[in-house]
Amino acid sequence: MLADSHCHLDMLDLEPYGGDIHNAIAAARAKGVKYILCPGTSVENFPAVLKIVETDQNLFAAVGVHPGEENVYQPNLQELINLAQNKKVVAIGETGLDFYYIKDEIKRKQQIELFRLHIQAAKSVKKPLILHARDADLDIIRILQEEEIKKVGGVMHCFTGSLDMAKAALDLGFYISFSGIVTFKNAEHLRNIAKNVPVEKILIETDSPYLAPMPVRGKSNEPLYLPYIAGFMANLLGISYEAFATQTTENFLQFCHI
């Protein structure tokens, strides 16, 4: 069995499934994907996320505001804490920093403030963070250290950072999650990092509907394709598919405190 640690179920292309999300989930289950974690990207889309995950005991949610979402409602700390009380919510996020397009210092400071808010909520409800990081490695590690995030830990989702960042995240109790990017031909640096991450700290994800892995790159991604990532990673690390699947699923359950 596999666990998709990051999949936007509310954004999937359901045309091949007659518009029914449960058919898409069933297709993934047929390929061995038992658990799926669906993170929120805004307060507005959170009800849609909950509606999906509440239908299945092996689907879970996270609540948060994606750092790239500018024109959405910005919750205060208590609002975020209240939303996180739902029993299907196992993590806070996705949150973090994304400075790739944002050069304005005021907007960067706003992202940082929202990031700290999510960290405070995570510590309050004792649930881990799902962290998005892009072009802000040093700021992210500094803030995580300042906020003593080791108390709750988290996951570096869709990791594409440096080896130094991976090591810093591991020191803070984080898991490192690898997506379809690790299968891309130009991702040799990421594969080298993966070899330096203890398998006990690895998660895998599709990040559907984005970043479909080889050999389906270019298609709309879905949890059905998670075995491609699992098989690639197992081969990369020199262990059997079954051992990798078992270990990463155990990691997922530990991460979610399930």
Image (spheres, rainbow, N blue to C red):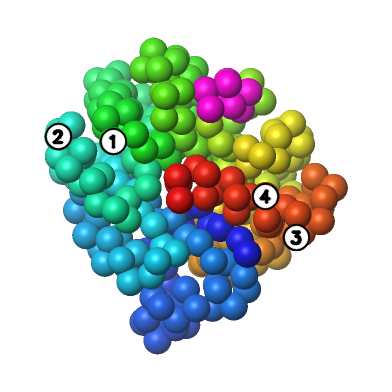
Label 3 or label 4, whichever comes before in sequence order = 3
Q: Secondary structure at mark 1?
A: helix
Q: What residue sits 42% from the left and 72% below the top?
A: 13
Residue located beneath label 1 in the image:
125
Residues at circles 3 and 4 in contact by the CB criterion of under 8 Å:
no
Label 1 or label 2, whichever comes before in sequence order = 2
Q: Secondary structure at mark 4?
A: helix
Q: Is residue 40 visible?
A: no
Label 1 to label 3, Cα distance in Å? Answer: 34 Å
Q: Which mark is residue 247?
A: 4
Membership of 109 in magenta stretch: no
Label 4 or label 1, whichever comes before in sequence order = 1
The amino acid type found where label 4 is placed reads Gln
Q: Secondary structure at mark 3?
A: helix
Residue located beneath label 2 in the image:
78
| Magenta residue span | 166-173
| Residue 95 image position (x, y, % from top left) | 36, 37
